[in-house]
Amino acid sequence: MARLLLARLFHAAVVGAIVATSVFLLLQFAPGDPFATALDGADVPSTVRAEWRARYGFDRPPGERFLRWAQALAHGELGYSASRHRTVAAVVADAVPRTLLLVGTALALGFAAGIGIALLQVRHHQRWPDRLLGALTLLGVALPEFLLALLAMTWLGARWRLFPVAGIGGLGDPAAWPLWERALDLLWHLALPAGVLALAVAARVARHQRAALLQVMHEDFIRTARAKGLGEWDVLRRHALPNAIGPVIALLGLALPSLVGGAVLIERIFGWPGMGLTLFDALLARDYPLVLAAVLMATLLAVVARTVTDVIADVVAPRRVRER
């Protein structure tokens, strides 16, 4: 276990360095800088533009800027966000918990729903519930997340007014509300963006879990469980599922980074103030320090998710062997 963690830490450092260097180099070829929109007007003197670019180091060669940024990053400094007029660390500290709440809720709901759908499909294998749910999960995989988001916003939000279509909280001063009311308001605003991401996750999990369950349904331990007189649901839940959960655990390590990427559009559509919306706005504003910080956070999250799933798989694998 210790060797696995050390290897993952080394892997995270290498991947983070490669991603940071690649993104930094790509941003050097992007036109303009964080002050292009505000300072490139005809009424702005050239001395003012030169002063602001010199203050934030944009008048330096790319190699020197990269070395200065890398040295600051090694000391835990992410730089200053010109578009937010705050340090990048403060912006990230506000946005990351909101994205983790959105993605974590979507993962929990999506995996629970996907496993439940797969169990129902296998229980009614080759009958109409299996075919109907299979068609729906295929549709969920095929439809883009942004299209699901727009449909949910149009029908559940704008027309039927069941959920708010944007933001993270209601009008007024939430600090004056009771804690339970603030929690309910947050969940109410979270429902649509998390639900859209959860549907996409559930469709993929259900298809993977169904295939894994069907592979173990003809094993000897399944026949033994049936011979003991156990009902079909007990056989599925207590014997088949623990031995078929491995591929879905591995899928968790791949789903989290993809969810973070999908959250960029979802947060933009629903106005959820997380890292996805922050990254989108930073790209439009050419706020390169904030863009680099957002990409590094996504990379770190992907490596951590893969490490956690590898550890869980190592813990589950011996139990699966013993049960067989």
Image: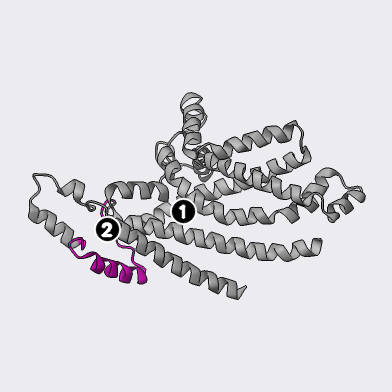
Amino acid type, residue under disc 1 in the picture: Pro
**Mark 1 sits on what residue?**
97
- The range drawn in magenta is 56-83
Q: Which part of the image, by quadrant, shows the N terminus?
A: bottom right
Q: Which part of the image, by quadrant, shows the C terminus?
A: bottom right
Amino acid type, residue under disc 2 in the picture: Gln
Q: Which of 223 and 39 is in front in this view?
A: 223
| Residue 98 in picture, x, y percent from top left | 46, 50
Q: Is residue 237 left or right of residue 207?
A: right
**Mark 2 sits on what residue?**
28
For the image, the number of numbered tags is: 2
Instruction: Name the secondary structure under disc 1.
Output: helix
Query: Residue at position x 33%, y 63% from top?
Result: 78
Query: Residue at position x 64%, y 56% from top?
Result: 249
* Magenta residue check for 78: yes
Q: Quadrant of residue 73?
A: bottom left
Q: How busy is the neighbourhood of tag 1: few (under 14 within 10 Å), some, or many (20 plus)? A: some
Please indicate, yes or no, whether residue 111 appears anywhere in the rendered image. yes
Q: Which of 194 and 135 is in front in this view?
A: 135
Q: Residue 297 carries which label?
A: none
Q: In this view, does 204 lie to the left or right of 257?
A: right
| Residue 110 in picture, x, y percent from top left | 60, 45
Q: How far apart are marks 1 and 2 (CA)?
A: 30 Å
Instruction: Name the secondary structure under disc 2.
Output: helix
| Residue 18 in picture, x, y percent from top left | 40, 65
Q: How busy is the neighbourhood of tag 2: few (under 14 within 10 Å), some, or many (20 plus)? A: some
* Magenta residue check for 69: yes
How is the protein colored in the picture? one colour
Which circle, 1 or 2, is nearer the viewer?
2
